[in-house]
Amino acid sequence: MRLFVAVYPPDHVRRDLRRRLTEALAGRRLRLTELEKWHVTLAFLGDVTGEQLPGLEAALDRVAVPRGRELRLRGGGGFSGRVTWAGVEGDLRDLSDQVRGAAKEAGVSFDERPFTAHLTVMYAHDDAVRAALEAYSGPPWTVDEMALVRSDPGGAYTTLRTW
């Protein structure tokens, strides 16, 4: 099963960003990714076997989720001209490092690219959306949990557990 660990912004935060980006997309045939999927990936773990899952969950039990840490979606950018993302203001690097350490402890491989806190909003590039993101500063929110999520065939996400 393909897994990742993520932080989900509250619904009102995601709706605020969607409203701003929908205005920027008016009249275009591009579309945003599904609102329910909007998350900040702390670590992409890739394929994890059922045998590895209990050890991974036990290691994640020891991760200190920084409850109450304030975050804000602000600004944006893109990867390789194919992904458009909103930036995250506030520090999640320590949490990402802890999650990656837990994966390593459990013998689970993970994507080792440098951590960039972001929320993917679209699998395309559009200048109007990028401009809207550059000017965007969303409402503040606080971290209250992290989630272990399975990426299902067909693109659906299933939360397996939260901490």
Image (cartoon, helix red, strand yellow):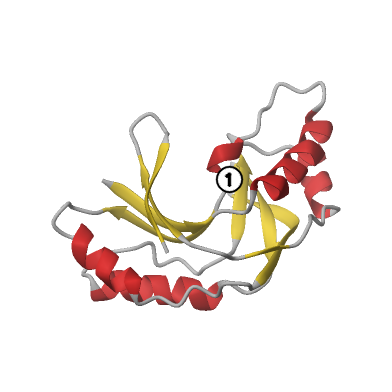
Q: What SS does tag 1 mark?
A: loop
Residue 50: horizontal and vertical position, in percent? 17, 52
Q: Say whether residue 9 is visible.
A: yes
**How crowded is the residue under tag 1: few (<14 C-alpha within 10 Å), some, or many (20+)?**
many
Residue at 68%, 27% (x, y): give it.
Answer: 30
Query: Residue 161 vs residue 132: left or right?
Result: left
Check the image and report above or below for 145 versus 66.
Answer: above
Left or right of 43, for residue 29: right
**Splitting the image into 4 quarters, where does residue 14 fall?**
top right
Q: Nearer the viewer, residue 112 or 160?
A: 160
Residue positioned 33% across, 71% down in the render: 61
Q: Which residue is mark 1?
A: 38
Q: Give the quarter of the figure containing the C terminus.
A: bottom left
Three-letter residue code for mark 1: Trp
| Vertical relation: 51 (above or below) 29 | below
Query: Along the line of sight, which residue is nearer the eye, 47 or 70?
Result: 70
